[in-house]
Amino acid sequence: METVTHTPTEGVYAATGDYAHAIEVRNAERLLFVAGTMGLDPAGVPGKTLAEQLELIWSNLRAILASADMTVDNIVRVTSYLRDASYAEANARARVAALGNRLVPTTAIVAETLVSDWLVEIEVIAAG
């Protein structure tokens, strides 16, 4: 599989340094669509802070990806659902760290979560 990042500079607004407008996936044999993943520990208990939940989310995503013989390097799309807009910066930092500064298309949406203790939910698409 090969990926090509597209961040055109003409005819569209500039992408910021933490995401790409698009990623082209060439010669992929598999796609993995991961449901929204919360910051819950293995017992289903949410982290007490935003930082704890983000750490748990990315740990959970790594476990889910591993079950498909993939890693965060296979992620080609990230969508974050934030309970509060003030979580955007911490969410972006956690994403950039988890992806090792690799740029992928990403969207963050402020939404009410199903359980008030869930501060962030993240879904990803991976290709291999």
Image: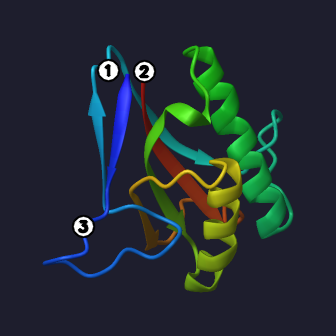
Using the numbered discs, state the Cα–Cα distance from disc 1 to disc 2 in whole angstroms. Answer: 5 Å
Instruction: Work out which residue is located at the far left of the displayed protein and give it.
Output: 11
Q: Which residue is mark 1?
A: 28
- Kind of residue indicated by mark 2: Gly
Question: Which numbered circle lies on residue 44?
Answer: none
Q: Position of residue 95 (x, y in %)?
A: 62, 57
Residue 87 placed where, x, y %? 64, 77
At x 48% / y 47%, what residue is drawn? Answer: 123
Callout 3 amino acid:
Pro
From the viewer's perspective, is the residue at label 3 or at label 2 nearer?
A: 3
Q: Nearer the viewer, residue 115 or 109?
A: 109
Say which residue appears at 57% left-offset and 22% top-offset: 70
- Whether label 3 touches label 2, CB < 8 Å: no
Query: Quick one: label 2, few (<14), some, or many (20+) residues within 10 Å?
Result: many
Q: Read off the residue under disc 2.
A: 128
Q: Residue at x 50, y 60 (%)?
A: 80
